[in-house]
Amino acid sequence: MSAVLWPVTASIAAALNAANGTGEHERAMRLMKVTEEAGEAAAAYIGVTGQNPRKGTTHTPTDVADELCDVIIAAAVALHAFTTAPPAVLDAKLHAAARRLNAHAHTHTESE
């Protein structure tokens, strides 16, 4: 994980708090921002594939990667509105996912 993720997203969250407050509406807006950014990533992928014949190929894989980074940043900023310990929450979630993956791989190895 990038060493600057949490300090930068904490600064973004603090700036948003100062500008917009910290009420339930603001929490919802931060959560919706994640969805907005995910939609932009999906739109970029559609542009990569040329799925829209009217528009053709409009994006590159680099554009998709850039949009996915925006999703990660938006999610990290939003996480600050839902916990006082965002790094610890994400670390715990990553470790749980790794355990599930390892358990799944171990189960499939034994059954083969």
Image (tube, rainbow, N blue to C red):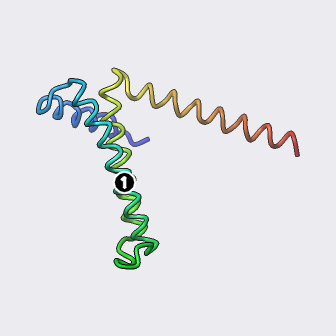
Q: Is residue 112 above or below residue 20?
A: below
Residue projecting furthest to the right: 112
Q: Is residue 54 above or below residue 11?
A: below
Residue drawn 39% across the image and 42% down it: 2
On the image, numbered disc 1 is attached to which residue? 39
Q: How many marks?
A: 1
Q: Image quarter for residue 88?
A: top left
Q: Compare residues 17 and 5 and report the one nearer the observer.
A: 17
Q: Is residue 83 above or below residue 38?
A: above
Residue drawn 43% across the image and 75% down it: 50
61 sits left or right of 110 in the view: left
Q: Residues within 10 Å of mark 1 (few under 14, many from 20)?
A: some
Residue 76's x, y, as percent?
35, 37
Q: Is residue 12 above or below residue 71?
A: above
Q: Image quarter for residue 65?
A: bottom left
Amino acid at dot 1 = Gly
9 sits left or right of 43 in the view: left
Residue 42's x, y, as percent?
41, 58
Q: Quadrant of the N terminus?
A: top left
Residue projecting furthest to the top: 84
Residue 43's x, y, as percent?
37, 62
88 sits left or right of 6 in the view: right
Residue drawn 28% across the image and 34% down it: 7
Residue 79's x, y, as percent?
35, 31
**Which element type, helix, strand or loop, lies under badge 1?**
helix
Q: Compare residues 25 and 3 and report the one nearer the observer.
A: 25
Residue projecting furthest to the left: 19
